[in-house]
Image (cartoon, rainbow, N blue to C red):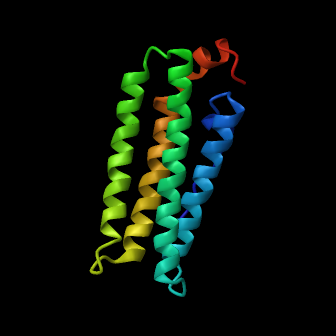
Amino acid sequence: MEQFKWTTKYSVGIKSIDEQHQHFFKVANLLVETALNDAAAKEEVIALIGSLGDYAFYHLKTEEDYFDKFKYPDAAEHIAEHNKYREQVKSYLDLIRDEKTDIRKIGKEAAIFSGNWLYHHILLVDTKYTKFFIEKGLE
C-alpha cells in the first residue's frame, strides 16, 4: 500500500495546524505498516489504533479551540464533520476490544480511513478557515 504523502497542497497556511496534519499522516502510515507486518504483535497494532485516535482527537480539539477563541462563523458545520470522524474512530476502538476482531484488518482499515478522511477534510473543509484564521493573526 502506498504511504499517505504530505505535500504543500495540504497546507492550510497555519504552521501549528500544518505540523499537526503532518504528524497525523505519520501515525496513520505507521499503523498501516504495522498492521501489514505479520511479525508485529497484536498489542502493537492495538496501541497504534489508540494512538491514532488520541492524536486525532487532540488535533480536532486544537482546531475547535481556535474556533471558540476567534468565533469562527462556520464552526458548527466544521465540528459536525469532526464528530463524524470521532464516531468512526470510536467504532474502531470498540472493535479492537472484541477478541474475535481481526486486529490487523481493523488497524489497516482505521489507518486508511483516517488518511483518506484527512486528505479530503483538509482540502474541502479546513482550507475554508485559512483566510479567517490568518486575519485573526494565526500563522
Q: Quadrant of the C terminus?
A: top right
Identity of the residue drawn at 46% across and 29% down: 125
Numbered label tally: 0
Left/right placement of residue 47 relative to residue 137 reads: left
How far from the left and from the top, in percent, is residue 127? Answer: 54, 26
| 116 or 48, nearer to the observer | 48
Left/right placement of residue 110 relative to residue 1 reads: left
Question: In the figure, residue 13 lies in which quadrant?
Answer: top right
Question: In the figure, residue 26 lies in which quadrant?
Answer: bottom right
Vertically, is 25 above or below 75?
A: below
Q: Residue 61, can we see it? A: yes
Left/right placement of residue 100 relative to residue 136 reads: left
Vertically, is 63 above or below 135?
A: below
Vertically, is 14 above or below 22?
A: above
Vertically, is 12 above or below 23?
A: above
Q: Residue 128, can we see it? A: no
How far from the left and from the top, in percent, is residue 37? Answer: 53, 80
How far from the left and from the top, in percent, is residue 119? Answer: 51, 43
How far from the left and from the top, in percent, is residue 136? Answer: 65, 14
In the orientation shown, which residue stands out farthest toward the bottom?
39
Identity of the residue drawn at 48% across and 46% down: 57
Question: In the figure, residue 27 lies in which quadrant?
Answer: bottom right
